[in-house]
Amino acid sequence: MSLPRIAIDAMGGDEGVRTMIDGAAMARRRHDRFKFLLVGDEERIKKALADHPGMSGASEILHCDDVIEGDEKPSKALRRAKNTSMGLAVDAVKRGEAGAAVSAGNTGALMAISKLALRTMPGLDRPALAALLPTLGDNDVIMLDLGANRECDARNLVQFAIMGAAYSRIVTGRERPRTRLLNIGTEETKGTEDIQNAAEILRGATGLDMEFEGYVEADKINRGECDVVVCDGFSGNIALKAIEGTARFVTDLLRRAFTSSIRSKVGFLVSRPATELLKHHLDPNNHNGAVFLGLNGVVVKSHGSADATGVANAVEVAARLLEDDILNRIRKDLGEVGSEGFAAK
């Protein structure tokens, strides 16, 4: 199956042009149908491409030597977006020259540029940032919003649930993803009025392809008991940072424990297969690629510190969303509910 090419912001991220190109090349070695529009400094991109002869026939370079800085305010980034690698990558999606854009740059700037260029889908109020997180179950869990919207009302949360479930059906294969709202308890009386209203709407929306199962507390996100966790961006970003910090704490603690004595070093050698499996499971590169859902186009945010493997995984996320037509899936589900279904009771 042929795919629209993917625009790569080669200048974004902490690791530089070479890591972005190495990641794109790795993704192409796995899936030789991938094609790319590489946006950034032409000379630097060509140097990186020299290590990947197979990329030359699958890539076009769009020269741009201006980059949005990691600490740049979104308002400033918007004003000069058309002359930056990030802005040109997103604009290629808008103009139909690419099917998706991937960037490891400034998250706030990428959201602002993408929202202005691509606009939100009809019927949607706001886009949301969604990511896959590992669990103890057989499934990864999709969590949204992770920081695009600090405050959300019941209507926003319902729309996020619809988008998250559509994404989950693609990556988990479940026809009716188990969907829950993040809350401080599982009882129906818990949480803010907006969370309770969103739950009431979702319970009554029987035409949606999801199983709404009420609430989930933060300590159960990674248990594998649900497929989609829905929250406002403020709560979601805090929960995500806590999960990532705990993962780093566990790995650092194990490393310290296994190097504390001769006996522990011997123990490490014995248990190495298990610790390597744990390391793989907790490595954020293996779950890289957050998605801005709700836009009229596919935009994937790679972690700024991702290595080539992480970038390759972000590229594959973009390709999978194109293959499975995520935009039309979301439009269909929104049509099932309709505007009247969002009226909080």
Image (cartoon, rainbow, N blue to C red):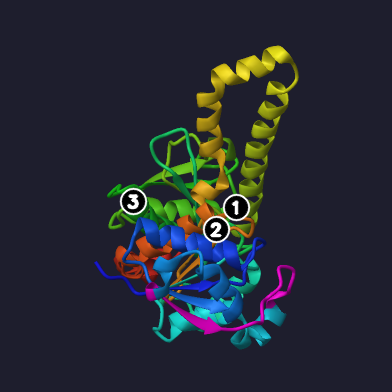
Kindly indicate the quadrant of the structure image that contains residue 330.
bottom left
Depth check: give the residue in front, 102 or 167: 102
Query: Residue shown at 56%/35% (left/top)?
Result: 279
Query: Residue shown at 55%/24% (left/top)?
Result: 272
Magenta residues, start to end: 57-74
Residue that label 2 marks: 145
SS under mark 3: loop
Please state which amino acid type lies under the numbered disc 3.
Met
Q: Give the Cα separation between the discs numbered 1 and 2.
A: 6 Å
Residue 178 magenta-highlighted: no
Q: Give the Cα separation between the discs numbered 2 and 3.
A: 18 Å
Query: Residue shown at 60%/52% (left/top)?
Result: 236
Please state which amino acid type lies under the numbered disc 1.
Gly
Q: Which mark is residue 125?
A: none
Residue that label 1 marks: 236
- How far across and down, in percent of the image, does residue 105 sit? 62, 68
Can residue 305 be seen? yes
Task: Indicate whether 248 appears above or below 55.
Answer: above
Of circles 3 and 1, the one toward us is 1
Of callouts 3 and 1, the N-terminal one: 3
Residue that label 3 marks: 210
